[in-house]
Image: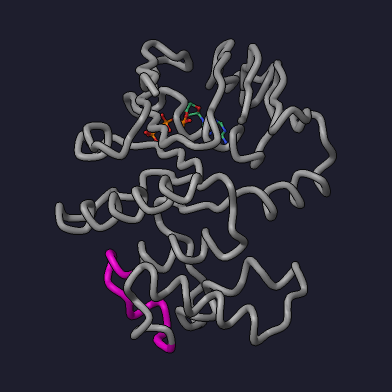
């Protein structure tokens, strides 16, 4: 469970270009649900996602992860928490050019100090799960958009995270690939993982696998469809 209590985020505080990106948000994200953040451009979805994923700190308010306050921790501990608890899929997938698919998937696990062969086996299994094992040796710059998305998902899962954070993961993908993405989300949900997605895409909000849609506007939560379960 991730709990945000009266969280606000201000960029460039006190300067002429000050932006109130989030205003007094209180919400809980359950560990076993798929949550979508939706809302117009600039409403604060990505900012909220970065706070949930311990990628940034709130200006005001507190964040607890599994009962432990994380919002005031030094960067070193935030980095450890991100590595242990979270997997990230970014909009442009942020794969490292010049490296192969397999090397990209293994990358976030190097700091954990696992044996190379164990790590490689894990990465190969995940590439199999997202049905792209045949591209393991290919340089990532040669992948199609849908393939890059699947590699990004495999990379997000390499450290077996409890929470998978995805920022606009289906932007520019066709309907078939959105369907593939939702199948992967379904599988993660079955495994008890929490998936938190920002999306402009109605195909995502309306998907059966989504338990909760949080509507945002102007830095506030304006609508919260919590699942009955
Ligand atoms: N690093 C930053 N520095 C200054 N302002 C920022 C920064 N990041 C975001 N903002 C501003 O904060 C507000 C919320 O931005 P955010 O990216 O969270 O919205 P969003 O709902 O994810 O938008 P989009 O759908 O376009 O990605 C916007 O006004 C944006 O310009």
* Of the pair 101 and 123, the residue shown nearer to us: 123
- Residue 90 picture location, percent across and down: 46, 52
Q: What span is colored magenta in the figure?
A: 137-147
Q: Tell whether 113 sits left or right of 129.
A: right
Residue at the (46%, 25%) spot, across then down: 44
- Residue 57 picture location, percent across and down: 70, 31
- The answer to which image quadrant residue 18 occupies is top right
Residue at the (42%, 74%) spot, across then down: 127
In the rendered view, would you say 40 is above or below 199? above
In magenta stretch: residue 140: yes
Q: Quadrant of the N terminus?
A: top right
Residue at the (36%, 30%) spot, across then down: 211
Residue at the (43%, 44%) spot, across then down: 167
In the rendered view, would you say 223 is above or below 173? above
Q: Tell whether 93 sits left or right of 24.
A: left
* Of the pair 9 and 4, the residue shown nearer to us: 4
- The answer to which image quadrant residue 38 occupies is top left
Q: Tell whether 88 sits left or right of 76.
A: left
In the rendered view, would you say 109 is above or below 141? above
- The answer to which image quadrant residue 163 occupies is top right
Q: Quadrant of the C terminus?
A: top left
- Residue 36 picture location, percent across and down: 38, 32
In magenta stretch: residue 63: no
Across the whole image, how many numbered discs are drawn on residues? 0
């Amino acid at each position: 469970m991730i709990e945000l209590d009266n969280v606000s985020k201000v960029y460039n505080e006190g300067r002429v270009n000050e932006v109130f990106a989030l205003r007094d948000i209180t919400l809980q994200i359950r560990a076993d649900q798929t949550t979508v953040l939706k809302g117009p451009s600039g409403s604060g979805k990505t900012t909220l996602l970065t706070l949930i994923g311990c990628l940034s700190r709130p200006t005001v308010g507190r964040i607890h992860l599994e009962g432990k306050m994380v919002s005031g921790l030094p960067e070193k501990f935030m980095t450890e928490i991100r590595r242990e608890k979270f997997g990230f899929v970014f909009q442009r997938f942020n794969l490292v050019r010049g490296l192969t698919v397999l090397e990209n998937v293994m990358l976030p696990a190097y700091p954990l100090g696992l044996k190379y062969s164990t790590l490689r086996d894990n990465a190969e299994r995940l590439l199999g799960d997202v049905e792209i094992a045949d591209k393991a040796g290919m340089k990532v710059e040669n992948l199609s958009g849908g393939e890059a998305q699947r590699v990004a998902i495999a990379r997000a899962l390499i450290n077996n995270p409890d929470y998978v954070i995805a920022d606009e993961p289906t932007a520019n993908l066709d309907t078939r690939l959105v369907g593939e993405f939702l199948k992967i989300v379904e599988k993660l949900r079955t495994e008890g993982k929490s998936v938190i997605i920002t999306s402009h895409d109605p195909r995502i909000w309306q998907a059966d696998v989504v338990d909760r849609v949080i509507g945002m506007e102007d830095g506030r939560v304006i609508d919260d469809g919590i699942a009955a379960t």
